[in-house]
Image (cartoon, rainbow, N blue to C red):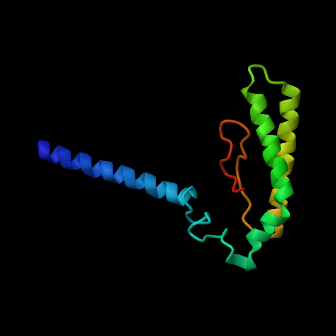
């Protein structure tokens, strides 16, 4: 009986660990279908380097987005953040995301969907 329980536990453990590895791969964090290391869409091989052109033409826009997100994060770590400034930054961040989405469409690239996340869910659904 103990051997059977041990074998079942070992099989369940292997199944759980492998499912997590597959989920991480397909989610793009390890370069699955959407990531560059495996040569997905974001490799320079698709559409004559469309992704590199997108990166080159949106570098200032992405830098502005990173600056606004850093300022927003700094405000949110304060004990009493200014609601007017945080909502203003949130609107600016959303506008920058919209501009990036428009640029991505012009390069025939996939546009992120879902929550851009300027809070606890930050980063989910965004590929740049």
Q: Is residue 99 above or below residue 106?
A: above
User: Is residue 59 depicted above or below 3 in this figure?
Assistant: below
Rendering quarter of residue 2: top left
Side (left or right) of 125 relative to 14: right
Can you give x and y, in whole percent of width and height, for residue 109 in the image?
Answer: 74, 67
Q: Is residue 97 visible?
A: no
Quarter of the image where the C terminus is located: bottom right
Q: Residue furthest top?
A: 80
At 57% from the left edge and 62% from the top edge, which residue is drawn?
31
Residue 83 appears at what percent x and percent y? 84, 26
**Which image quarter is the N terminus in?**
top left
Q: Who is closer to the viewer here, 23 or 70? A: 70
Q: Quadrant of residue 119?
A: top right
- Above or below residue 117? Residue 106 is below
Residue 108 falls left or right of residue 38 = right
Asked if one can make out residue 112 in the rendered structure from this viewpoint, the answer is yes
Question: Looking at the image, which residue is at 25% across and 49% down?
Answer: 10
Residue 48, horizontal then vertical, whole percent: 74, 79
């Amino acid at each position: 009986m103990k051997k059977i329980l041990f074998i079942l536990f070992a099989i369940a453990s292997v199944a759980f660990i492998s499912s997590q590895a597959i989920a991480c791969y397909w989610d793009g964090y390890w370069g699955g279908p959407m990531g560059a290391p495996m040569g997905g869409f974001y490799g320079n091989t698709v559409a004559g380097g469309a992704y590199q052109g997108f990166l080159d033409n949106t570098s200032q826009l992405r830098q502005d987005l990173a600056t606004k997100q850093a300022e927003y994060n700094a405000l949110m770590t304060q004990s009493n953040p200014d609601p007017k400034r945080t909502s203003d930054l949130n609107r600016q961040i959303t506008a920058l995301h919209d501009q990036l989405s428009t640029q991505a469409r012009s390069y025939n690239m996939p546009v992120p969907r879902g929550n851009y996340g300027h809070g606890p869910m930050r980063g989910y659904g965004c590929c740049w």
